[in-house]
Image: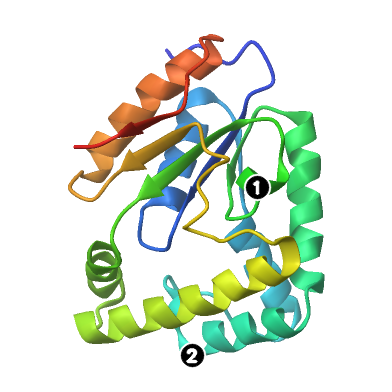
Amino acid sequence: MTKKPDRKVVLCISGMAGSGKSTLARKLAAKYGLRYYSGGDALKALAIDGGYEPRKRGWWESQEGMRFLKKRGVSSKFDEKIDKKLVGLAKQGNVVLDSWTMPWLLKNGFKIWLEASVEKRAERIAKRDKISLEEATKVLNDKERETKAIYKKLYGFNLGEDLQPFQLILDVESLRAAEVFKVLRMVMDKVVHKSGLQKRIVNH
């Protein structure tokens, strides 16, 4: 049995769409008895309140998801509401945050960035959503352009480019999900047991 954390662990998992961050964040939360909270899921809940139907997997890359993304670009109220809640959860501790903003907004916590090329991530999204690679690449680029503009305007950071907040940058380009999980388990064992880690880049 995995030992539960003996202090208030705050883990931030981030990476661009298709990097596997949400799946891995959930698995880590379950493995270490931590609460899991997704900024994306919380935004979907707000979208539902606004009359959208984000039920299916890959909704963010759909036409409806892109319409909601453009709406967020016009008004920051959606993102500000979610981020305020995430900051509150971080203060409580023992949580895994699946978020694009928390690594920049939080001073505490252990922050991990999953790095993969647009080509690799588009392949994964095409397979997941059963669409062509060309379509997946287009929607991915469109979504990321809009998303980066939102956070640049709201908080001033460059999503996917400014990686200064992260203690660990893991290249997942050629790794299977199980292999990434194994690496992150080793990292978590050190974090949970209070062994500090210096910033490093892990390439495979």
Q: Which residue is mark 1?
A: 104
Who's the residue at 79% across and 51% down the image? 85
**Quadrant hosting residue 149:** bottom right
Relative to 42, does residue 145 appear above or below in the rendering? below
Vertical placement of residue 38 versus 120, above or below: above
Q: Amino acid at mark 2?
A: Gln
Residue 77 shown left or right of residue 65 in the figure: right
- The residue pinned by badge 2 equals 63
| Residue 170 % position (x, y) | 35, 39
User: In the rendered image, which quarter contains the N terminus?
Assistant: top left
Q: Say above or below: 52 vs 8.
A: below
Viewer can see residue 187: yes
Q: Residues within 10 Å of mark 1 (few under 14, many from 20)?
A: some
Above or below, 3 against 187 in this view is above
Report the front residue among 54 and 131: 131
Q: Is residue 88 left or right of residue 58?
A: right
